[in-house]
Image (cartoon, rainbow, N blue to C red):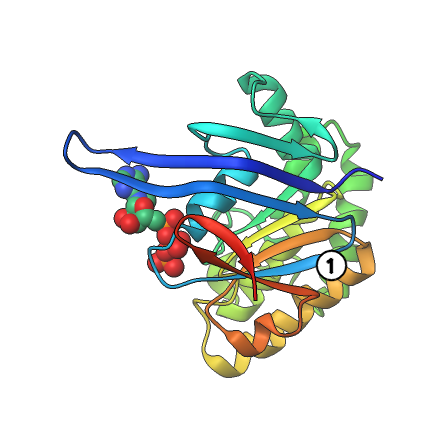
Amino acid sequence: MNDALRLEGIEKGYHLGKPNEIRVLNGADLALAPGEMAALVAPSGAGKSTLLHIAGLLDTADAGRVLIGGEEMSGKGDRARTRARRQRIGFVYQFHHLLPEFTAAENIVLPQLADGTDPKIARARAEDLLGRVGLSHRLDHRPAEMSGGEQQRTAFCRALANAPSLLLADEPTGNLDPGSSDTVFDTLVALVRETGMAALIATHNLELAGRMDRVLRMQEGRLVAT
Ligand SMILES: Nc1ncnc2c1ncn2[C@@H]1O[C@H](COP(=O)(O)OP(=O)(O)OP(=O)(O)O)[C@@H](O)[C@H]1O
């Protein structure tokens, strides 16, 4: 079976004008099997976000290949990358980035409508997903009317709206206090396990990382097993 995500020889630098070139990724390789959950642990500035953005087709590498479900994405144009991002990849950020003027359910309906799903089916899926993370009573609340943990759980549901095969999360509980971070993280893990997605989750929290199938570190712009 194809890997859910495969990175081969990824290089990335930021060119701020000589002599200020920063090399962040320097031949990073990764193979993530379907259903596998891996943690990405590295100090601040090591390049976790850069790697996740490249894997999530939000940014392009200077060199190397990105394969999603066995399909090479590196050379593809914007339309194909956008479609792959919408259908096959879910992304969770440290801050929820929910649309403030829409309710929790609407935030999960919208990406489905963008993908051509029937509105009734989209609404039913939003209700189902929010129910699974214990938010059936928050369907029609706007983000400002929810707690930080509730907002982040809604953001997880939005990432899963179009049933992607790969979830990428950039410190998904980094913005929450330690107590709610733990329970919200548990919710994310349960949701990923239930759906059988592969997931790559950047976190500073070693205890949370230890609950994944595998923990990866970044060392000199490469990924290494711990
Ligand atoms: N757009 C950019 N332009 C220039 N430099 C950048 C840019 N984005 C990131 N960098 C630099 O690249 C390096 C890696 O950044 P990145 O955000 O990937 O690290 P990180 O491991 O995710 O850090 P954190 O844990 O603090 O979020 C940092 O030194 C950062 O300053």
* Nearest to the observer: residue 104 or residue 204: 204
* Nearest to the observer: residue 149 or residue 12: 12
Q: Is residue 139 visible?
A: yes
* Nearest to the observer: residue 37 or residue 170: 37
208 to 49, vertically: above or below: below
* Nearest to the observer: residue 223 or residue 48: 223
Which residue corresponds to the image point at 59% horizontal and 32% vertical from the top-left? 66
Quadrant of the rendering where the N terminus is positioned:
top right
Q: Is residue 89 left or right of residue 95?
A: right
Q: Is residue 8 left or right of residue 10?
A: right
Q: Position of residue 135 (x, y in %)?
A: 68, 66
Q: Position of residue 161 (x, y in %)?
A: 70, 45
Q: Is residue 219 left or right of residue 159?
A: left
Name the kind of residue labelled 1 in the image.
Val
Q: Is residue 56 visible?
A: no
**Residue at the extreme right:** 1
Which residue corresponds to the image point at 75% horizontal and 49% vertical from the top-left? 33
Which residue corresponds to the image point at 52% horizontal and 52% vertical from the top-left? 223
User: Badge 1: how crowded within 10 Å, few (<14), some, or many (20+)?
Assistant: many
Quadrant of the rendering where the C terminus is positioned:
bottom right
Q: Position of residue 127 (x, y in %)?
A: 76, 55
Residue ID for mark 1: 192
Q: Position of residue 169 (x, y in %)?
A: 56, 54
Q: Secondary structure at mark 1?
A: helix
Which residue corresponds to the image point at 58% horizontal and 55% vertical from the top-left? 155
34 to 207, vertically: above or below: above
